[in-house]
Image: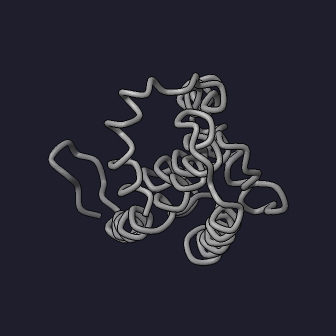
Amino acid sequence: MPEDESGCKLDLQARACVDEYLAWQHTTLRRSCLQALWHKVMFPVFLREQVSPKLLATMLAELDELLQLFEDKFLQNKAFLVGSHISLADLVAITELMHPVGAGCQVFEGRPKLAAWRQRVEAAVGEDLFWEAHEVIMKAKDFPPADPTIKQKIMPGMLAMIR
């Protein structure tokens, strides 16, 4: 097997799988997870803006479809996204999926395969580090409302980001 400049063995197929996941996630899962956080928490709590129930339902249905695709295409029946060991793809994926969790979405509920994967990622990272990394997002509902001046400055960018 080839080695990189540090002497580490390269598994080109595993690297290709990571690249495939990263190419997919930044235009699909990332967007949907951020929308869940913004529509369920940041707009109503932080910015004091109402979100239509229809828009929220549509966005959550899209997230549910993407979670199914994530399980079917990437996780399949593997321990981790690339096989039997945690990879960058798993770390990026769990970070994205914790956004809707911080918004109160139960993305792992009713999805035993996804829930077991999350448990394996947490165990591989270490429970303390896992929760420390997600501490801020898990407290998103507790954010105080934004100052009106800040709200006015960030609102156009936030709307563009989640559309």
Q: Determine the residue positioned at 60% across, 31% down.
A: 140
Judge whether 63 appears above or below 141 on screen. Answer: below
> 136 or 95, which is in the foreground?
136
Q: Position of residue 134 (x, y in %)?
A: 57, 32
- Using the image, determine if residue 153 lies above or below residue 111: above
Q: Tell whether 134 sits left or right of 116.
A: left
- Tell me where residue 145 appears, x and y as whole percent: 55, 26
Q: In terms of depth relative to the viewer, which is nearer, 45 or 28? A: 45
Q: Quadrant of residue 49?
A: top right
Rendered location of residue 43, percent (x, y): 56, 44
> Outermost residue toward the right?
110
Q: Residue at x 67, y 45 (%)?
A: 101
Left or right of residue 155: residue 98: right
Task: Determine the image quadrant of residue 139.
Answer: top right
- The residue sitting at the left extreme is 5
Picture coordinates of residue 33, whole percent (x, y):
55, 55
